[in-house]
Amino acid sequence: MEAKIAACSHLMAEKGLTIAFAESATAGWLCSEFALTEESGQVLKGGLACYDADLKMSLLKVPRELIDEFTPESMEVTREMAYRLGQLIPADIYVTVTGLTTPGGSETPEKPVGTMFVFALIKGREASFRKVFAENCEEVIRQTIIGTAELLIAELKNNRDIAV
């Protein structure tokens, strides 16, 4: 996993970009992976772990109505978290994560445990994915982190004009 995060961090440093996170299901693990890279001081601004829906509302100011309508684990809430994060941490890239790593959330047959939502706001451009990982909690989070690094790398390489 470190190789993908390291490559992503290196690419961001080359472009002079910074990143901030608001994580629910990954609980800060994604942010901590970026802290372990050589370029961490150049690229990482910080992150919030907002595992509980109440923190999404109180810290990020995600409207209760949005959470009630779509559930805390949804692309709609994940997207809103990214836009709200910019009011707390200045950065070029905002990455937010919600999902279901264990039973007891908003899982349904259409949204089973293992469903993860990642949203990235890259200098105003949106990129996201919804994936279902059929593994244990740790593996779901690990796959989400890898998928997030792959998403960011693809976006940064495909949009050469993204830079400071």
Image (tube, rainbow, N blue to C red):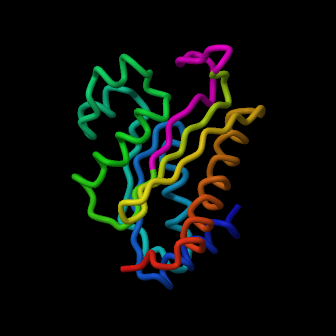
Residue 33 relative to residue 22: left or right: right
Q: Is residue 74 visible?
A: yes
Drawn side of residue 107 relative to residue 12, left or right: right
Tell me: residue 92, above or below residue 121.
below
Q: Is residue 42 visible?
A: no
Among the 4 quarters of the image, the one containing residue 110: top right
List x then y, in percent, for residue 143: 70, 47
**What residue is shown at x 54% (from left), y 48% (from top)?**
128
Residue occupying the far right of the picture:
135
Residue at 48%, 81% (x, y): give it. 13
Q: Looking at the image, is 39 positioned above or below residue 88?
A: below
Q: Is residue 44 magenta?
A: no
**In the figure, is residue 108 to the left or right of 35?**
right
Quadrant that contains the N terminus:
bottom right
Residue at 64% of width from left, 31% of height from top? 115
Residue at the spot 67% in from the left edge and 55% down from the top edge: 146
101 part of magenta stretch? yes
Q: From which residue to which does the magenta span run?
A: 96-110
**Residue 149 is drawn in which quadrant?**
bottom right
| Percent of width and height locating residue 84 | 28, 46
**Main secondary structure of the magenta stretch:** loop
